[in-house]
Image: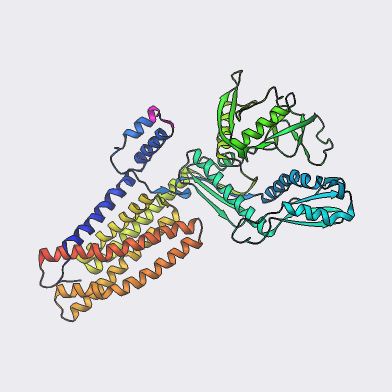
Amino acid sequence: MLQISLWKRFVILGLCLAALITAAPNLFYSRVEGHNDAVAAFDKTGAMTETQVAAKAAWPDWAPSALVNLGLDLRGGAHLLAEVHLNEVHKARMDALWPEARKVLAAERATIGAIRRVPSPAGELRIQIGERTQIARAVEVARTLASPVVSLTGVGQSDYEVTGEGDTVVFRLSEAEQKATDDRTMQQSLEIVRRRVDAAGTREPTIMRQGTDRILIEVPGIGSAQELKDLIGTTAKLTFHPVLGTTSNPDAPVASGNELLPDASRQGLYHMLDEVPVVTGDDLTDARPTTDDNGAPAVSFRFNVSGARAFGDYTADHIGEPFAIVLDGKVISAPTIQAHIAGGSGIITGRFSIEEATDLALLLRAGALPAGMTFLEERTVGPELGADSIESGKKAAVVGFGLVIAWMILSYGLFGVFAAVALVFNIVMIFAFMGAVGATLTMPGIAGIVLTMGTAVDANVLIFERIREELRQAKSPARAIELGYEKAMSAIIDANVTTFLTGVILFVLGAGPVRGFAVTLIVGIVTSVFTAIWVTRLLVVIWYGWRRPKTIVV
């Protein structure tokens, strides 16, 4: 008997109704988007401008407000491909190791003689000893600094390889430690880039690792690639160094362990600094824009417990000496320590504008990039081009929808109308699901939806053709419809499972446009199977129960 139980009818109708309600905000995209932005601004700052108040009032608070996010190619925005300088991290590791190595080797000075650091390539630390014949003892002592690698692939290995070459002790990062360090650096870079982009209030950015040392960054809605570079391109690497002297000669000789950096505000002035910082920006817990005693823009900062202790101890022992604050390789301030600075807080002054002080505070709060970046590729997609893409996508979807509907109605009559209604709900469910989970729609995603329109009716074609076959065998209309749905089920499942698995593979292995296409394809397959099997069946059952036809034409 052709029948669907009452509870199944409620479930089918409930899902269709929920999809309509959830997808409805996309019909009023600009109003809902303005409302959401105003709510987000209020949650962040606790206040709204008059424009934001009006935007919030344009859409009721009780109504659903989830939207399908538009990708870079639809909204416009900026695309960057950045290469992370991993060698800088290796060098920093060796620089940080030098004070410890100097300490343990100095304890053996009576045996190995005087020690000194000699120039070495990035990723190596070379220390020359006075007694060449005692190199084996020096290497033995130096190896006490090595520790096990903290990674799944580095079990049983040490982080440093220590060897002797003539009268020189050589430290290198082991292969396992170098891989673990590179992975940590990339993960940290990804997280910091994401924080900076999120702090700027951008919507639905795509930030992902590509290869071993590259990061892909796509931010819809931002004005230009340069604006995005200005936001994330600065490393914001803050360090505090002892000042050994000043000079106007940029080619002044630099002793091993020291560095010569320019003054950011006074052209032609250079500071000789100890290469090893007393504290770094990694110890910061907060940074905020403020003003100095003269009312000029500045940035206040606060250290964590360990940073506050190191900062306080150094200032207590070096009263009357200059102390350099270095940001991204430039000395932005070199004040003289007037008194012991306890409590772990201070202020960075310089010739900042209000905007520069605010941006610097934002960058410091987000954290310093562990290494610099080189932008290998940059692209800006204007909003006009995005609007053109949306218009083209709409035309393609409308034409595709119209052709499919016309073909189904011409081929199957009233049953084709039922398939058309199911197709409408299929598209509605795609948008409802993508809006609910915050998925991003791209131009290839629109192509996936258009493709789904064509494949969505495949299940109905199988069902309707099967019904025709049963009618040819003189089955009653009710029995023919029932057998049509039952016998077509296996073919429908087989066809859609293989396509679904293909979509999953595209999503997992693909990137960018390929993943955008895969998302709508996967969602469209699931919704098309539901609408083709259950929505059309419910429509047929309701129609058949109402009309009770003696014969049907499919």
Let me know if residue 50 is in the magenta part: yes
Q: Residue at x 63, y 61 (%)?
A: 155
Question: How many labels were placed on the picture?
Answer: 0
Let me know if residue 179 is in the magenta part: no
Q: Quadrant of residue 530?
A: bottom left
552 sits left or right of 317 in the view: left
Q: Quadrant of residue 135?
A: bottom right
Q: Residue at x 32, y 74 (%)?
A: 491
Task: Examine the rendered structure and indicate whether residue 207 appears above or below residue 547.
Answer: above
Question: Residue 54 in the image: x percent, y percent?
Answer: 34, 31
Q: Residue at x 25, y 69 (%)?
A: 411
Q: Quadrant of the C terminus?
A: bottom left
Task: Examine the rendered structure and indicate whether residue 168 appears above or below residue 196.
Answer: below
Q: Residue at x 69, y 59 (%)?
A: 175
Question: Residue 465 in the image: x percent, y percent?
Answer: 25, 74
Question: Residue 307 in the image: x percent, y percent?
Answer: 63, 36
Name the outermost residue toward the bottom.
473
Q: Quadrant of the N terminus?
A: bottom left
501 sits left or right of 167 in the view: left
Q: Is residue 264 visible?
A: no
Say how the picture is coloured.
rainbow
Residue in front for this viewpoint, 99 or 141: 141
Q: Is residue 36 visible?
A: yes
Question: Residue 315 in the image: x percent, y percent?
Answer: 69, 28
Extent of the magenta region = 44-51
